[in-house]
Amino acid sequence: MPDPKPTKAQLLSRLNKLSAQLKATEAGQTTEIAHVSEELTSPNVLSFSDPTVRATAAACIIDVFKVFAPDSPFSDKETVTVFKHLINELGLLSDQKHHLFETRFYVLEQLCAVKAVLVLLDMEEDELVCELFLALLSAIKPTHSPAVEGCMVSLMQDTLEQSDGLTGALVRTVLQPLCRQAPAPSQGSAAKQLMRKLLQTLPLQLHTELANWVQMLVQYREWPSETDAQEPADQEQVEPAQVHCLVLELASISSTLVQKVVPVLENKLQVSDGSGRVETAQLLGDLLLSSSSDAIQAAHIGCLDLLVQRGEDTSAEVRLTVVQFLDKYQDQEQPQEMICTMLSDRIMDTDENVRS
């Protein structure tokens, strides 16, 4: 007969003893705990019905990584198994009142400190890295402490900085929360704020790399492919309003993130159909009203003039968009002669909405 499955009491007793042993073991002294990988990857432990057993097992797994760092006692298959378990536990950080919250925060805190996620990068487990980011984004709440938010940002920052180039899936995971328009004060707004803070911490090199993906997103209005930021993706379409929201969010973080967007908009402004020119004029206008306006105009001389010239567009809706932009722009800047002339000319526009 097969051995009976261990009970909750038996598993917790073994895991608590193992936890104490791991915490008493200094980093690098792995001889006495070389057996733990098989026990911690057992379905009897990781798939046990009781949440306390699963959370305690996750804490033990993190302690194993601490002792063995920078190596791992787990095989590649076992590594995937234990990381899926860790990701599941991190997703449960959303429940701050749960009695296991501190245990789960310990897992997050130590995962960040040990940098164990770099093992996934070495294994090229991009899908699991995305799952990790998505778990953090789903778990974050506005009421989380700065310590929780800080660990999440640090963990994702280290992962991005150590990655050997950003994949399309990871770029989508990072940028998608910023596409949401005026989310309710719940998980959506917290995820958006988390991504803003993450992007603010990234070095210029990664901002430049992300800018290539953003350029492609604006050009094709599709989420990036898995491999190349220079090729159009055969992926899900992105709504113009989402692109608009994303670009303005990025512009508020760093002008570097949107510098490559402006040439795309300049081109679309001249060759798009009427509705496309309206959307493009609205986005370029809002960029020129953003905190990145000076940097954008310095890098793309003539983009303001190009937009002003669309005040004579054949589409009344485009002309109206330009007039509305100029009205706001002259409140912020010393109006140029070209702007004053265009506004004067539009007083006699054939369209009543533009004239008004």
Image: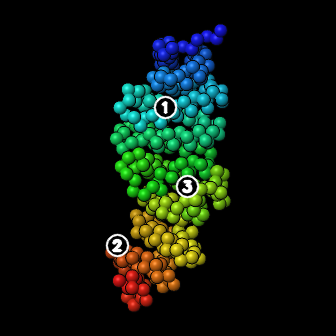
Mark 2, residue position: 332
Residue 226 can be seen in this image = yes
Q: Nearer the viewer, residue 346 or 67?
A: 346
| C-beta proximity under 8 Å, tags 1 and 3 | no
As measured in the structure, the alpha-carbon distance from the residue carrying label 1 to the one carrying label 3 is 29 Å
Image quadrant containing the N terminus:
top right
Label 1 vs label 3, nearer the camera: 1
Colouring mode (rainbow / by chain / secondary structure / one colour): rainbow
Q: Is residue 230 left or right of residue 195?
A: right
For residue 146, what is the image quadrant? Answer: top left
Going by the numbered disc 2, the residue's amino acid type is Gln
Residue located beneath label 1 in the image = 89
| Residue 125 placement: quadrant | top right
Left or right, 33 with respect to 249, comes to: right
Q: Which amino acid type corresponds to the residue marked 3 in the rendered image?
A: Leu
Quadrant housing residue 109: top left
